[in-house]
Amino acid sequence: MALDEYKPQKGGEEFETGHDFKYVGTSPDRPDGFDKVTGRARFGADMSAPGMLFAAIVRSPHAHARILRIDTSRAEALKGVKAVVTRADFAGGLSGETWNVLENVMAGDTALYDGHAVAAVAATSALIARDAVKLIEVEYEVLAHVTDVDEAMKDGAPVIRGGAADGSVPEGLHPNVVRYHESGHGDVEAGFAEADLVIEDHFRTEATHQGYIEPHACLASLGSDGRGEVWCCTQGHWNVQKLCAALLGLDTSGLRVTASEIGGGFGGKTTIFIEPVALALSRKAGRPVKLVMSRSEVFRATGPTASASMDIRIGMKKDGTITAADGVFRLQGGAFPGAPMEMTAMCAFACYGLKNVRHVGYDVMTNRPKQAAYRAPGSPMAAFAVESVIDELCEQLGLDRIEVRLKNAAREGTRSSYGPRFQRIGLVETLEAARAHPHYSAPLKPGQGRGVSCGFWFNFGGETSVSLALSEDGSAQLMVGTPDIGGSRASMALMAAEVLGIPYEKVRVTIADTASLGYNEISHGSRVTYASGLATIKAAGDAVQKLCRRAAEKWGISEDAVKWQDGCAVPSGPNAGDFDPLPIAEITASMGATGGPISGHYEATPEGAGVSFATHIVDAEVDPETGKTSVVRYTVVQDAGKAIHPAYVEGQYQGGAAQGIGWALNEEYIYGPDGRLQNAGFLDYRIPVASDLPMIDTVIVEVPNPGHPFGVRGVGETSICPPLAAIANAVSAAAGVRMRHLPMSPPSILAALEKQAHA
Amino acid sequence: MQYHTPASFDEATALAATATGTTRFLAGGTDVLVQMRLDLVTPDVLIDVKKIAGVHDIVREEDGGWRIGIAVTGAEMSEHEGLCRDWPGLVEAMDLVGSTQVQGRATLTGNLCNASPAADSVPAMVAAGVEATVTGPKGSRRVPVEAIPTGPGKTSLARGEMISALHVPARVRGGGDAYLRFIPRTEMDIAVVGCGIDLTVEGETITGARMALGAVAPCVVAVRGAPDALVGTALEDAALAALADLAQAACNPIDDKRGTVGFRTHVAGVLARRVARIAYDRARENQ
Ligand SMILES: Cc1cc2nc3c(=O)[nH]c(=O)nc-3n(C[C@H](O)[C@H](O)[C@H](O)COP(=O)(O)OP(=O)(O)OC[C@H]3O[C@@H](n4cnc5c(N)ncnc54)[C@H](O)[C@@H]3O)c2cc1C
């Protein structure tokens, strides 16, 4: 995914707000629910084809090594092995991000991280494929490696790939620094001089994985005619189509990609890892190939988020006014450019109206897997560092944490820290709702602490194409191109039902394959309910207009004199009352004879995705003898613009908080001195289990987004921005020691307590 | 790979004695199958012990002790009234293993013979004084369970030998046991430190104590000095402090992704105090 796609957008078309809704705002069961609870839903690994082969991948055991020789002959001689591929079986002559993707999918001259793919086999059974992997001999020359972001920037650190830096990087930096960002406004030094208290601190967060339950899986078939098919679990199948075609040297339209049901993605399925490998094997073997990753492959070789090293300096007056804010953000995103450091920088201070602000970002390469998006990529770590310092300032100046945030909060018209002026936004409303929530004033027990944090995310629009076809009985088939990663089919059906005036159950929503619609951007950037939602409303509106035309023709009146009301065409204006309302099913029953099938279409790149803010309140309890934290109470307050399906909006709020709890307390990529990943499994990569979580209370604030016909703002990502900071503030208060390094695992809390006792 | 389902211990040990290559017994398979999937172990011979007569039974012995069959699952132990009454600490230790699904398969014998330093039931078994019958081509012998594991993944069982039963002693009046482990989460985790203890009391006074630690050394560690710290006391603060010191002194841990030497040693002391209080209350109620 290109980083530009997350950059702030200028406002697009503006819509009226303040509608009355019949279906929107209710929470019916999801259309895919029955299939999922009965096991009928088909996920990535559930598809098979006649004559199918099974693939397995040979991976580097070294963090950094030159590949001297790959001998595939013993594997090829094994009975049942039908094809072996290496880098030579993919397209040459690629450049830019497409080259990066290929280099990550299959190593070229050098293995760049533990788990990097170097070859793959396809065989008649999964067991034979696994055995064949062990017969492939790879001769390596092991090179010095570096996995830590600060170490990778130091003089003398091993160079991952010389010449990878772009023009943004100032001279004199280590070649592992590949991109540089600087932005802000005002004069920060003058601002700090005005402050009564300036606090500067260093913060670190570790790389975390999205932890989706379904490992990557695909079934691919590619003939020597250059026509192929892929079935896979992905957040964006047009992107799979485009990238796979490039990596295999095919016409984009020669490949048809179908998205399966998806067992979680959270950003991690916005790129490709195995699909081109399965295609290359299929092309060579002349048979369909299935490739399913194991959990340890998912950890070692897909994209976790970046780890970060950050310095934050904020000045505040005694009355709580922030006078200046300055941040340095160093992110490593593995052995490729792309760590989302400009997102970190641009989100860091976005919650506040600041006269003087500056941010500097470094994108640093290390010997780790290529990072991928993870829910609001780059923003949660920024909030952790910034909101921790604000908490310290409030503590030392004796100020209320919510009052201080309200005093400085960004509002409509505020010049944002990253440049543009905000349109209508809802940060103040979330802070006021948090202050009024009983949680904020509830008494704490001994050993407990309370933390508060705000968070920000841009949200996104992107290319969108939607089609809606009416059936003879008046029911509707809606085709959208954005894989449903959070209940979006329910939201789409609600919006279509609202416009058409037919019950929710009468709308069937399908995630169409790449051959059935125009290009659809990935389901990312919290864009689906906004952009596919907008397109659904417009496509349904297009169909309604055609329905009205049929009625007008039947009645022999002007099309303008027909309006659509409660699922019926109704004569209006001078013709009001002349004819009985004509229900949708009556119009569609005769559509074959009155001009043919009725469909609605819409395609656009909508640009009015409204930014969104949240405020979280957390109570944590720390066992001072073991350093173990329990999160005992959690409240999420977030602006949804308009909650189309409130229960699934709540699900997004709770999911963000749950993942944030894992990131804050126990999740981390642990590398040994040999540069190998130590915890490539859910036993030692500790995501929260159900019993680790409290009930997560939610408050949906609705400050309509004027860029969406019904006021929607994306909600999927903002919910993971405040948790790291809110939990760190709560834990620091409970433990009595400031925690500036995530995760706040029991040994690290105990070590901090001990250090403080000896200080 | 060969897969056998012997009907008797004779048949099982004969198979094991003559097998070539890597051999594994298969009880619940919650370690073996995971290791196979991870390519850590690829057995040539797999001997499923679940078809052997009597291995699913928990039997009360004449002396009041319990014989636990080698295929008895954690779930079956937790549902056994007599065992839960007599040895709540042992049962709670086994109950910590895995999830509900894992509990339906995992066995006490498998937990012991997998020889993980972090195995949860093993410190509880050592504290309870559990013994194992080892059966081989040359007959049977009875040994204390702490003699089985000899290092991570290693046991004292000779080629062809297997465990044919575990023996839990009779519960004396005024006795109570308990087990606690430290994990960063609440469930589905591997012990960073585990601590099992068994106490006997007369009135308020402790008359006997046995304690063992897990995950702080290559094998389970029996804390031999526990009686010196506790016998004759009513578990006052001084006794607890002495016990915690002993526990910490017995630690010989490593630094790894799960915990540092310092952290493990510190937490061993904390758990020793906490687990002793639980066992003390249980023992006093059992008079
Ligand atoms: C999800 C999950 C969570 C887990 N959580 C925990 C936990 O919290 N705590 C913990 O301690 N463990 C845990 N485990 C590990 C495992 O469940 C336990 O060690 C379990 O008790 C093993 O028993 P089993 O019957 O499944 O053994 P198996 O896998 O069948 O066998 C284990 C070993 O014992 C040997 N063996 C079995 N029977 C005999 C016999 N009669 N004689 C000689 N050798 C024999 C086998 O050859 C093998 O080497 C977990 C495992 C999983 C998959």
Image: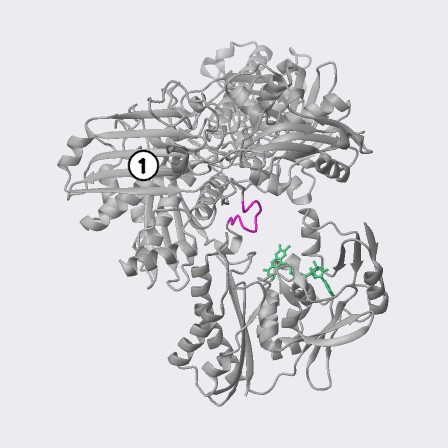
Secondary structure category for the residue under label 1 = helix
* Magenta highlight on residue A681: yes
Name the image colouring.
one colour
Q: Which residue range is magenta in the image?
A: A678-687
Identity of the residue drawn at 50% across and 79% down: B225
Instruction: Measuring from the top left, give residue A234's x and y in whole percent.
Output: 59, 30
Residue A50 lies left or right of residue B65; in this view the side is right
Residue A229, position as x, y percentages in the image: 69, 22
How packed is label 1: few (under 14 Cα within 10 Å), some, or many (20 or more)? many
Q: Is residue B267 left or right of residue A388?
A: right
- Look at the picture and state if B220 lies above or below A683: below
Q: Residue drawn at (52%, 80%), measured in percent from left and top?
A: B282
Q: Residue at x 65, y 63 (%)?
A: B111
Q: Nearer the viewer, residue A238 or A731?
A: A731
Q: In which quarter of the view is residue A309 placed?
A: top left
Front residue of A712/A302: it is A302
Residue that appears at 56% across and 83% down: B175
Residue type, mark 1 in image: Leu
- Report in which chain the residue with disc 1 lies: A
In this view, A543 is above or below A122: above
Number of marks drawn: 1
Quarter of the image where the C terminus of chain A is located: bottom left
* Magenta span dominant secondary structure: loop
Ligand 1, by image quadrant, is bottom right
Residue pointed to by mark 1? A427
